[in-house]
Image: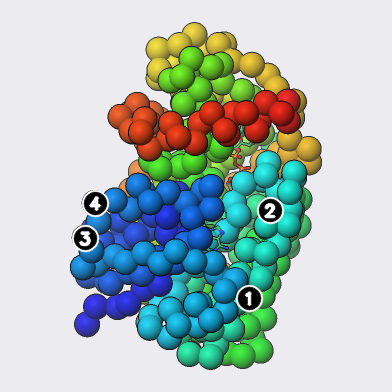
Amino acid sequence: MARKILVTGGAGFIGSNFVHYLVNNTDDIVTVLDKFTYAGNAASLSGLPESRVSVVRGDICDAQLVDELVAQSDVVVHYAAESHNDNSLHDPKPFLDTNIIGTYTLLEAVRRHDRRYHHISTDEVYGDLELDDPERFTEHTPYNPSSPYSSTKAGSDLLVRAWVRSFGVQATLSNCSNNYGPRQHVEKFIPRQITNILVGERPKLYGAGLNVRDWIHADDHSSAVLRIVEAGRMGETYLIGADGEKNNKDVLEMILAGMGQPIDAYDHVVDRPGHDLRYAIDSTKLRTELGWQPSFPDFEQGLAATIEWYRDNESWWQPQKAHTEAKYKEQGQ
Ligand code: NAD
Ligand code: DAU
């Protein structure tokens, strides 16, 4: 029988990717709960069959609405969040509301209705690594978040662990590295640089650009989450990563080269305060225990396809662009 899956934040970048993934790979019936903040985009769900996907506009902090939707679902997969580090440095309050209170509200509802819950989180909860550290993050790395964003995500993870231990909530958690792919908001690094080039602005690199991120295609994140939802052990955390470490300068040069620009045609701008140096995921547990493998191991190929997507889908990103850049300009970035 088809499962009923509630996907919070399903109009955002990774949540919408997961909804597409479910429609294409399962017979699940999906309800999206999304507040449609600046980061939610109805166009990210357009074209999906109405018989499979319904969308509810609402806040995960709204306990009554959350209770009703959780009661009607078999599984809850929780993506909704304030997700951007730079925003969290200028206005942390929405991060506390959505990431902490929103997660608490969902946990209380899944506890009341005894529903299966999967919690989406980030590798940033572990802080950062030195460039030459031979170790990568594992499920045993101590939490050490740096920013208001990552500290609220860490707080939400700890709430889930407490609700598992204290109340027996049937939950799994995953912490994933940096995602790229279609439908990512233009405030984020890769889409910002691609769309800057498309509108004739120079790309912007924070500091010297030596910071390393561990890139994974959003489709691979979705396949890993579905595998954990179906086969993960209750109470367990799984790290999701595809061995995609690259520094920002190298990624930017790949974008410039891939778009036919000179590879030095960008500006260095003021660095992000407290900027994490390096993230790196060891996903051995997910691969050995659940047999998961990434399907997009070639970053350069995935990046080329992502560039094409932004070229072909200007109507999706154009409405966000001017406002996003005006905000960055105010901040000297
Ligand atoms: P996003 O900002 O693109 O999307 C977030 C979505 O949540 C939006 O549709 C927004 O409208 C919705 N939302 C925000 N507040 C809400 C609220 N109070 N109630 C209901 N909906 C609300 O974010 P993303 O990059 O797709 O990230 C999704 C999740 O994945 C987050 O939990 C994030 O921490 C996690 N994550 C992201 C990455 C990454 O590289 N982007 C990596 C690992 C984990
Ligand atoms: O690691 C997972 C995390 O990845 C997720 O939890 C977050 O939700 C997601 O936003 C992402 O966080 P980052 O801060 O790593 O991503 P961002 O795209 O903001 O920046 C990536 C790197 O690029 C980072 O080192 C900062 C740098 N950067 C960013 C922007 C926007 C630039 O050099 N120039 C830019 O214009």
Residue drawn at x 54%, y 28% as measured from the top left: 322
> Which is closer to the viewer, label 2 or label 4?
4
Residue in view at x 42 percent, y 55 percent:
11
SS at badge 4: loop
Query: At label 2, which amino acid type do we have?
Result: Tyr
Tell me the distance, in whole angstroms, between the alpha carbons under discs 4 and 1: 32 Å
Could you say whether the residue bearing mark 3 is in a helix, strand or loop?
A: loop
Residue that badge 2 annotates: 149
Q: Which mark is residue 49?
A: 3
**Rendered position, 147 above or below 227:** above
Per the image, label 2 sits on a secondary structure element best described as helix
Q: Is residue 78 left or right of residue 209?
A: left
Q: Which of the two discs, 2 and 4, labels the residue nearer the N terminus?
A: 4
Q: Tell me the number on the disc at residue 47.
A: 4
Amino acid type, mark 4: Gly
Q: Residues within 10 Å of mark 4 (few under 14, many from 20)?
A: few
SS of the residue under disc 1: helix
**Mark 3 and mark 1: span between their CA atoms?**
31 Å
Q: Which residue is mark 1?
A: 104
Picture quadrant of residue 261: top left
